[in-house]
């Protein structure tokens, strides 16, 4: 009925064709405001687009924010500038001699030489499973050493040549240590900590693994109760595992070069190290399982890291299978 109150009669087909699109558009405009996850990455924003962004950002997931903003404009030179810094001789030499820091650290426990085994890669890949039941028996120290080495140990080196700097302090031989897992730019921003409960010849405690020297530095002692308070997997009895492997991301180690994309590179590296650990554990006859249900703040406090520039980003349990 029109505003003149004059009754108008029309066929249903005419109404659908002539009137319904207009009425639908009016109802939609007044009752439905589209939201857009791309507003913040748009160069020119109309008032409506800004409003869409305001409404959406109230419930936006932080991970979505990261993905939406990890695509810089093609004309951006920020990342090129960051990368170019790492081509300077003093930076290359710094990367080549990172082991000096570890050599100057407190007394560490040397690990046994890793085993060389002939388990077929295809067999280990096909046999790998997330194991959730453990016997409570200890892990052999030589086996833990092997798991850590093949997980992220030093497997070679890249000699540094044509650096126009001579140093009596650093010597003549300069090389960047290469590991069993790849890392963006060879920066290796992931540290591996262990929460040891049942490993032969090791006291229960928190340890930091040094890939460059293949040793463990004890941080502190822990109890079984403290370990169990760090995670809450409903289908795993943590009192029967051998150890937890905790991955810590040092944000500034690669963000200084890559900026925002550095986080994605770090997650990729964690996945690559994790798979090495799982396959090696499988080949040695142990069980392992990724754990997502953990208390980040409790782990960081236990590891004596600040949770600001160093963050716990992943957790694996390993142990003797039932």
Image (cartoon, grey):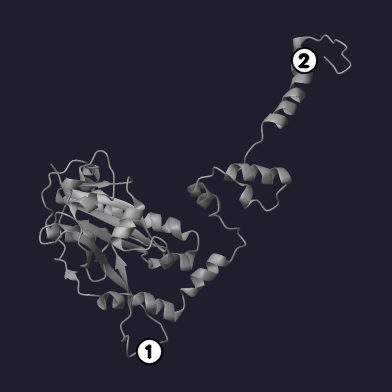
Residue that numbered label 1 is attached to: 166
Residue 279 visible from this viewpoint: no
Q: Residue placed at 41% from the left, 67% from the top?
A: 253
Count of numbered labels shown in the rendering: 2
Give the image quarter of residue 313.
bottom left
Quadrant in the picture for the N terminus: top right
Residue 267 visible from this viewpoint: yes
> Residue 216: percent from the left, percent from the top?
21, 66
Relative vertical location of residue 162 with respect to residue 302 in this rendering, above or below: below
Give the image quarter of residue 22.
top right
Residue that numbered label 2 is attached to: 15
> Residue 212: percent from the left, percent from the top?
26, 70
Is residue 285 toward the left or the right of residue 163 in the image? left
Q: Residue placed at 10% from the left, 49% from the top?
A: 137
Relative vertical location of residue 267 with respect to residue 58 in this rendering, above or below: below
Mark toward the viewer: 2 or 1? 2
> Residue 147: percent from the left, percent from the top?
20, 57
Give the image quarter of residue 32.
top right
- Identify the mark nearer the N-term, 2 or 1: 2
């Amino acid at each position: 009925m029109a505003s003149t109150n004059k009754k108008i009669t029309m066929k249903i087909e005419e109404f659908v064709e002539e009137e319904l699109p207009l009425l639908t558009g009016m109802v939609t405009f007044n009752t439905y405001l589209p939201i857009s996850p791309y507003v913040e990455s748009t160069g020119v924003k109309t008032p409506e687009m800004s409003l869409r962004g305001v409404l959406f950002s109230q419930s936006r997931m932080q991970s979505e924010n990261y993905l939406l903003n990890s695509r810089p404009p093609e004309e951006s030179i920020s990342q090129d500038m960051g990368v170019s810094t790492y081509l300077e001789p003093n930076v290359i030499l710094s990367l080549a001699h990172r082991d000096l820091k570890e050599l100057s650290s407190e007394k560490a426990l040397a690990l046994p030489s890793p085993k060389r085994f002939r388990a077929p890669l295809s067999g280990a890949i096909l046999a790998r499973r997330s194991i959730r039941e453990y016997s409570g028996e200890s892990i052999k120290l030589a086996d833990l050493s092997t798991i850590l080495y093949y997980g992220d140990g030093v497997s070679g080196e890249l000699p540094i040549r044509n650096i126009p700097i001579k140093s009596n302090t650093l010597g003549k031989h300069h090389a960047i240590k290469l590991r069993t897992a790849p890392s963006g730019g060879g920066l290796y921003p992931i540290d591996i900590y262990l929460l040891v409960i049942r490993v032969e010849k090791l006291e229960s405690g928190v340890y930091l693994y040094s890939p460059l020297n293949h040793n463990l530095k004890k941080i502190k002692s822990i109890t079984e109760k403290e370990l169990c308070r760090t995670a809450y997997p409903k289908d795993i009895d943590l009192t029967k595992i051998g150890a937890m492997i905790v991955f810590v991301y040092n944000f500034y180690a690669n963000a200084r070069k890559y900026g925002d994309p550095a986080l994605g590179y770090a997650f990729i590296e964690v996945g690559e190290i994790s798979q090495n650990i799982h396959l090696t554990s499988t080949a040695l006859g142990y069980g392992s399982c990724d754990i997502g249900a953990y208390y980040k703040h409790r782990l960081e406090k236990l590891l004596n890291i600040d949770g600001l520039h160093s963050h716990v980003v992943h957790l694996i349990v390993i142990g003797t299978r039932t």
